[in-house]
Image (spheres, rainbow, N blue to C red):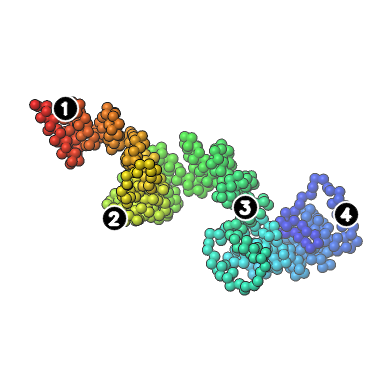
Amino acid sequence: MDVMGDKATLLETGRFVQPADREDPGAAAEEMRHRLAAEAGDVDAMSVLGSLLLRRGDLDGAESLLRAATAEGDRAAANNLGVLLHQRGYADEAAGWWRVAAVAGSAAAAHALGRHHRERGDEPAAEYWLRQSAEQGHTLGAYALADLLEHRGDVGAERWLRAAAERGHREAAYRLARALDRCATTDRPDRTERTAAAPRRRTDPTERADRAGDAARTPADEAEQWYRQAAAKGHRRAALHLGAILERRGELKEAGRWYLNSAKDGEARAACALGFLLRDAGDEESAAVWWLKAAQDGDGNAANALGALHAERGETQTAERWYRAAMDAGDVNGAYNLGLLCAEQGRTAHADQWYRRAAYAGHREAANALAVLLLQGGDAAGAEPWFSKAAEAGSVDAAFNLGILYASRGDEAAALRWYERAAAAGHTDAALQVGTARLREGDEQEAERHLRCAAGGGSAEAAYRLGTLLDARRPPAEAPVLGEPAAAKTECEEWYERAAEMGHRRAQVRVGMLASARGDVVEAARWYRKAAEAGSSNGAFNLGLLLAREGSEPEAALWWTRAADAGHGRAALRLALLYARRGQLAQGQRWASRAVDLGPAEVAERAGRLREALRQELTA
């Protein structure tokens, strides 16, 4: 209980100051003065001296003085006598003296009496006395009242938390910040309605400016202010939350400072967060130090981070040990990470075991991983319910995988539903699948929307398909006018180029064709060569055409040969014509036959006529 008086204020927390190793001569003289006055019958001196002895822990010496002062009607002495009796274990007698002091107007006694009733389970009496204390401006009374009201879910709790916080109570500041944090994520239309219904009055410009500033402050801004106040007073959890706010805002240096303060005070979550901050800054060794501290204090997230760190270094046994420590700390991610570790090592049975453990505990990505494992083992029927469970729990990958599963069964409608669900959550490959399906249905507007999403997410195929869609809408290009500047690249060209830069072979060929049409032979050759070297037969064929036009027939023949060997009929026909011109009729006839086999129809027809002509020439 608190030791407070109207004439002598002791520690608010109930923790009494221990006597110093060396007695302060000034304090000793002051105590002697009070003692002499008390012996002479001074009631105020009795009360003050009793409180001093109570603080020192001299209960026997304090009790007689406090009883004497209380008998003379000193309410501070009555309050402190209650504290003394509570310390001795006489809670009911203590409550009686607190009541005497509270009725006499002692806010500290009303607070102590309210806490006594709450401990006894008498909440109405507790609320009455705590409210008496709070309304008299007692900080601890306001906080205790707020705690009682919050426990009951009473909306009035915030008012008293705010009152205590404004008077410097750090736990109240922290809890007020937490309440505002929750409020920041919840719509509060009733607050706007109450403001709108308030009576209107004239205000001067300064007041209007102040009110505008208050309205501009959001609950999140105010929460940060209270976190900062509590953290500055050494509240470690407030420092943790303040660090998180600053980190989200990108103010990493200050975030790190608050994380460090909190971690030094023993907050494991802050030590873990500081570790991630250091890792992202490239200081992996320092990160490991803080993760180790947090993991040893029971933080499962830090244990997982240490496990991942050792796994990346190939230290699988140490990684497994930390993942198990994470599980022991109640972090289900430990089981999931153990499953990943076992799967990487080919220990499928163990991976199945750990995935199941995490999945049964509600880990959605573990459920998805388990389904993938079952599917790889040929158990599609067993995989489906796990995919469904993970997808319903919000796993985007599981929704996409369900789409693949239904598509493999030929159920395109069901597949599309899951693709759309995953695409709505930002899954790039799912957006590509939806865009492709809409293209097949002829819904170009929806197809374009999904292809843009997928292309923006980094899908080369989506960027290429979007380019082809926009290209088909483009009006025919007019012949360039001599002396006019070159036209700017169209949007479809930009998408083709983005896909080409990501290694998409058909896009590379298309970019080469567009460059060639502009007369940029060097650029065209560069893209054709990239596509050809990546295995594109069209790229090799077009590169051959370009080289032949530039007079490099021998090199052109090499690329046509590569294209023809890959099944390109036009390349085989070009080779047949090349060898025929050179007089190498047998070679020409062989490539003409190859072109007939490869097609398409118009190529096969031309190659057939050429082959027949070469045969007649050879037999003449």
Numbered mark located on residue 585 in the image? 1
The residue tagged 2 is 441
Q: What number is the disc on residue 350? A: none
Residue visible at 61% across and 58% down in the picture? 222
Residue 148 on image: x %, y %: 63, 64
Confirm whether residue 317 shows in the render: no
Query: Callout 1: 10 Å neighbours few (<14), some, many (20+)?
Result: many
Contact check, label 1 and label 2, Cβ < 8 Å: no
Name which of mark 4 and mark 1 comes first in the sequence.
4
Is residue 86 shown left or right of residue 146? right
Q: Is residue 363 visible?
A: yes
Q: Residue 377 location, x and y as percent? A: 33, 43
SS class, disc 3:
helix
Q: Earlier in the sequence, mark 1 or mark 2?
A: 2
Q: Give the mark toward the camera: 1 or 3.
A: 1
The alpha-carbon separation of the residues under discs 3 and 4 comes to: 43 Å
Identify the residue position indicated by label 3 in the image.
238
Horizontal side of residue 415 vs 265, given as left or right:
left
The residue indicated by pointer 4 is 32
Instruction: Write the residue at 70% across / 67% down.
Output: 135
* 160 with respect to 533 (left or right): right
Nearest the eye: 455 or 79: 455
Residue extending farthest to the left is: 620
**Residue at point 60% right, 51% down?**
242
Q: Taking 522 as reference, is 36 above or below it?
A: below
Q: Earlier in the sequence, mark 3 or mark 4?
A: 4
Element at label 4: helix
Q: Nearer the viewer, mark 3 or mark 4?
A: 3
Q: What is the C-alpha distance between the residues marked 2 and 4?
A: 98 Å
